[in-house]
């Protein structure tokens, strides 16, 4: 009789067991290269189309970003930020190279967001770039190599960068869930009856923007929630649980995979129902939480060990 | 494990998670930080804004002015927020139609000034900004349309 609870306890213990983050050399190299490619989408390619910054946002609170209106300046900023991002991805002088890219990205995005409209497509990717840069600066703390440490952070710094980016992704989802709780007086997961108005609003916005029509799945959801409004809770509660407990993805690789796939499913459902595409978030989830590079490496090691000739 | 050891373990393993969480929640929406407030309230009522011609025929703003309807709605909320900051309204959710019209006119003026029409034939045409309010009450959703503002298209993107 007592064997079942003890087995259950072992199984739960094994699921939630904390396993310190270990990252292989090639995993760190490949993840950083692909991440740099994703981050390159943040770099501005043309001056902003707005003449000023009527509602200062981010860096615009602290400095005049008017220099971004000059096409020649923007050309050089774009060129140098792309070059430094590439150098940073190769591990060269990361505190300086990634720092410059980060400055250019934050300055240009702050300018565009200073029109009174705040979009949320680029924040997480930029925060991950910030986390990577912070990890590269953190490496200098213990570096005994002085200038050489500044020029070449090395493998340990790269592994830390991957881990800090992963933590930042998890933090963004947990924070998003906390915001939902705070802004809704702790009732968000149970406001399913109001969810339908958000879906209808999203459909009308797509029609008003580009004559977009909701897909079959979205139409089915609208019919379902029109007939049974409280079923909206069944959609909100799993989404909230996934977001709030995203920090559990940091416990071990299995939970990281599970939360990565769960959050991807959440984004896909949002996209199907409301045509809201958080592409950068999904790419980051694939890369760092689902992490096919790690699982491919683990599978190769498993196959090799199975077929290794017995001594 | 002592308290000090526990703090050290948490700090060395997930310290950045805690730092980032605190920064995001305390700084809020200041790029690159964000507390990700999208859809965080889910009130019983929400609005959408759209642009029509004089006869009320929908003009798809992304195709006609390179701006999304959701951006115009965010501009609208920003203008309402300004009224709230200056003490002219108490709550955005219970704002009067007059205040919405004042903000709507500013939003339409902003669009016509900063987003030139992609089709030069639009220049000189009158357009209207409409607000659609969706409200969920007693198991059903009602839809209400108000005309907030009118204006004339003055700019068009030069042909390449």
Image (cartoon, coloured by chain):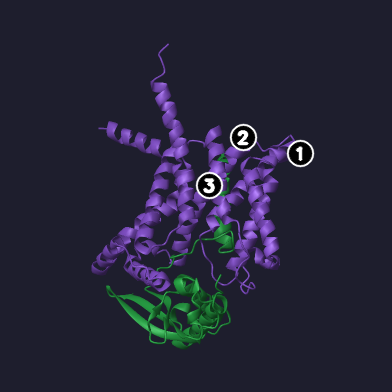
Chain colours: A purple, B green
The residue at the point 61 percent across, 51 percent down is: A130
Q: Chain of mark 2?
A: A
Residue topped by disc 1 = A147
* Picture residue at 65% right of the left edge, 63% below the top: A59
Work out whether mark 1 precedes mark 3 in sequence or the reverse, and give the earlier one: 1
Instruction: Tell which subunit mark 1 falls on.
Output: A
Q: Are marks 2 and 1 in contact (CB under 8 Å)?
A: no
Do the CB atoms of the residues marked 1 and 3 lie less than 8 Å apart?
Answer: no
Q: Which residue is mark 2?
A: A155
Residue B73 position (above or below residue A17): below
Please rate how many residues cluster around mark 1, counting C-alpha atoms within 10 Å: few if below 14, some from 14 to 19, many from 20. Answer: few
The image quarter containing residue A69 is bottom right
Residue most extreme to the left: A227
| Picture quadrant where residue A88 is located | top right
Residue A90 is drawn in which quadrant?
Answer: top right
User: If you read the primary sequence from the N terminus, does the residue marked by circle 2 or circle 1 appear first?
Assistant: 1
| Secondary structure beneath label 2 | helix
Residue A168 in picture, x, y percent from top left: 54, 50
Q: Mark 3 = which residue? A: A167
Q: SS for tag 1?
A: helix
For the N terminus of chain A, which image quadrant?
top left
């Amino acid at each position: 009789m007592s064997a079942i609870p003890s087995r259950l306890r072992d199984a739960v213990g094994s699921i939630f067991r904390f396993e310190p983050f270990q990252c292989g050399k090639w995993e760190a190299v490949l993840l950083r290269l692909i991440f740099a490619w994703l981050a390159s989408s943040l770099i501005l390619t043309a001056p902003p189309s707005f003449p000023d910054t009527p509602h200062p946002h981010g860096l615009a609170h602290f400095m005049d970003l008017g220099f971004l209106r000059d096409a020649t300046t923007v050309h050089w900023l774009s060129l140098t930020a792309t070059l430094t991002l590439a150098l940073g991805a190769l591990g060269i002088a990361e505190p300086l190279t990634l720092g410059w890219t980060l400055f250019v990205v934050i300055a240009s995005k702050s300018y565009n967001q200073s029109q009174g409209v705040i979009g949320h497509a680029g924040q997480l990717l930029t925060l991950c770039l910030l986390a990577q840069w912070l990890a590269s600066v953190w490496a200098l703390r213990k570096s005994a190599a002085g200038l050489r440490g500044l020029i070449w952070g090395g493998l340990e710094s790269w592994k830390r960068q991957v881990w800090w980016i992963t933590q930042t992704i998890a933090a963004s989802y947990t924070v998003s869930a906390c915001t939902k709780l705070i802004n809704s007086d702790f009732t968000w997961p149970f406001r399913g009856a109001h969810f339908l108005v958000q879906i209808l609003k999203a459909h009308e916005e797509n029609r008003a923007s580009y004559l977009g029509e909701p897909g079959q799945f979205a139409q089915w959801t609208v019919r379902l929630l029109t007939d049974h409004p409280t079923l909206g809770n069944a959609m909100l509660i799993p989404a909230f649980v996934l977001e709030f407990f995203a920090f559990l993805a940091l416990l071990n690789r299995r939970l990281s995979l599970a939360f990565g796939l769960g959050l991807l499913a959440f984004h896909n459902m949002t996209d199907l129902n409301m045509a809201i595409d958080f592409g950068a978030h999904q790419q980051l989830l694939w890369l760092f939480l689902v992490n096919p590079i790690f699982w491919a490496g683990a599978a190769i090691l498993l196959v090799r060990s199975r077929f290794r000739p017995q001594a | 494990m002592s308290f000090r050891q526990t703090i050290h373990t948490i700090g060395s393993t997930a310290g950045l998670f805690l730092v980032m969480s605190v920064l995001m929640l305390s700084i809020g929406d200041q790029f690159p930080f964000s507390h990700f407030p999208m859809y965080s309230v889910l009130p019983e009522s929400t609005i959408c804004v759209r642009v029509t011609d004089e006869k009320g025929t929908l003009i798809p703003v992304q195709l006609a002015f390179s701006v999304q309807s959701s951006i115009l709605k965010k501009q609208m909320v920003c203008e309402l927020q300004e009224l709230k900051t200056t003490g002219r309204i108490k709550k955005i959710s219970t704002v009067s139609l007059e205040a919405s019209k004042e903000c709507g006119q500013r939003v339409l003026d902003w669009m016509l000034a900063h987003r030139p029409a992609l089709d030069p034939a639009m220049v000189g045409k009158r357009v209207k900004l409409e607000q659609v309010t969706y409200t969920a009450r007693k198991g059903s959703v009602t839809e209400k349309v108000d005309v907030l503002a009118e204006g004339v298209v003055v700019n068009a993107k030069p042909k390449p």
